[in-house]
Amino acid sequence: MQPHYDYDAIIIGSGPGGEGAAMGLTKQGARVAVIERYNNVGGGCTHWGTIPSKALRQAVSRIIEFNLNPLFQNTPRLPRTTFADILRHADSVIKQQTRMRQGFYERNQCQIFTGDASFIDEHRLSIKYPDNTTETLSAAHIIIACGSRPYHPQNVDFTHPRIYDSDSILELTHDPKHVIIYGAGVIGCEYASIFRGLNVKVDLINTRDRLLAFLDQEMSDALSYHFWNNGVVIRHNEEFEKIEGMDDGVEVRFRSGKRMKADCLLYANGRTGNTDSLKLENIGLKADGRGLIKVNSMYQTAQKHIYAVGDVIGYPSLASAAYDQGRIAAQVIIKGQANVQLIENIPTGIYTIPEISSVGKTEQELTALKVPYEVGRAQFKHLARAQIVGMNVGSLKILFHRDTRQILGIHCFGERASEIIHIGQAIMEQKGEANTIEYFVNTTFNYPTMAEAFRVAALNGLNRLF
């Protein structure tokens, strides 16, 4: 006799991974509950990560665009805009996203419980509500989609009013003239762009020897140059010895002997999974040192009826991938297996100013693999559409096999890079002869467009062959 459970599935977390799983299950008639600790759905993606940071970036990039536009050079510049000013724009976007996602759950009869979840045993969860009352729910399947939070080293005082992480920076109310950003990963670089765009002095501290080392080196170098050209000071191979908050700012002492002071500090060096309060020991699971849970290709943990998706399982830690992971886990629950899986070449979008986006192999990877490749490039400054809209900074690079002409990687630096990349990604995903650089030469593009960069880059690359 089958045991009776309150739900077919309970999902811990309502971010992209949880939402993907919930929608995938409810569309197939499953009884689903979602436990969300925050008072609104959407997870870290909506409230502290992807959505607010990109809304901030959009506002800043439009300010920069206005101030650089030749049409307005003889008119007064925009009044100085502070970080707190543009936070109001981000807040309006967050509210729109929250209302929309709340509607998804309501329309699909997915019940939301607002509280902290923890495991009692392999099929039961305890919910602790804000008023300290508790409730127990049971389910045949459980999906852990509780996301991640900024990593806090123990020797940094994050309670100090001038020391922020990438969540608390959204509560910044004073107007800093100088900020130190510790950590030059994706989040650190994005916020360096935002603050510098607001004419805030920025020191970007990189614990490694170059920015965003996972990128194609040419893209990384382009970002480094652009930062340098705009006044961001990058300090490579530095690690802090002590971070001390003061009444009027923050002082950082480095192991190299350097000392630095600024109005405030944004610590953006790593993230950790939100698993410490789940009581995983009650179900025989254990997270690693960064709070991450190990799963198989179907997102099952060591307990096969318990799944984990999104940031809590680590790479690629992207909202887009998390949604698909949740959808795949739902399919496994309903059908016993998944008919789809994450694509091999997941695009990377980095929302600096300008953007960076890439898909596939880098030049360094292809060289290490001894693949005979060639390069096709298009400079944005040579495109009519870029000249019209004043988007002259940037380039598109296509890497392709010299013999088969197969597209191996695409890398783009410049405004709208994260949109432009999808054209190339669509061709890369085709099979056989459909995935060759010749596609871009034999296809007629709208003119003038940014997409035309693919045709220009393809012609450039084919001209290099002998």
Image (cartoon, rainbow, N blue to C red):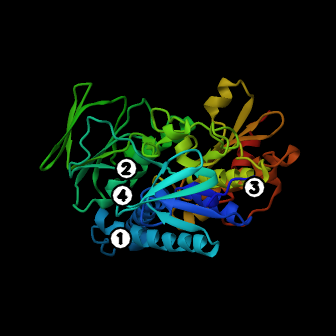
Q: Does residue 236 appear left or right of residue 122 in this picture? A: left
User: What is the C-alpha distance between the residues marked 3 and 2?
Assistant: 44 Å
| Precedes in sequence: disc 4 or disc 1 | 1
Which labelled disc corresponds to residue 192? 2
Q: Say which amino acid is labelled 3.
A: Ile
Residue 266, x across and y down, in percent: 31, 47
**Residue shown at 35% from the left, 70% from the top:** 88
CA distance separating discs 4 and 2: 8 Å
Residue at mark 4 to residue at mark 1: CA–CA distance: 17 Å
Question: How many badges with numbers are in the image?
Answer: 4
Residue designated by label 4: 197
Specify whether 34 is left or right of 187: right
Query: At which x and y percent is residue 116?
Result: 43, 55
Q: Secondary structure at mark 3?
A: helix
Foreground mark, 2 or 1, reads: 1
Task: Name the amino acid type tagged 4.
Answer: Gly
Q: Residue reaching furthest front?
A: 1
Q: Secondary structure at mark 2?
A: helix
User: Disc number at residue 159?
Assistant: none
Q: Residues within 10 Å of mark 3 (few under 14, many from 20)?
A: some
Question: Which percent across, then down, holds residue 322?
Answer: 60, 51
Nearer to the camera, 390 or 23:
23
**Front: mark 4 or 2:** 2
Of the residues under marks 4 and 3, which one precedes in the sequence?
4
Disc 4 to disc 3: CB gap under 8 Å:
no
Query: Which residue is at 50% across, 74% downward?
Result: 99
Q: Please, what is the three-letter code of the amino acid marked with disc 1?
A: Arg
Q: Earlier in the sequence, mark 4 or mark 2?
A: 2
Q: Is residue 355 among the parts visible in the rendering?
A: no
Quarter holding residue 11: bottom right
Query: Tags 2 and 1 in contact by the CB under 8 Å rule?
Result: no
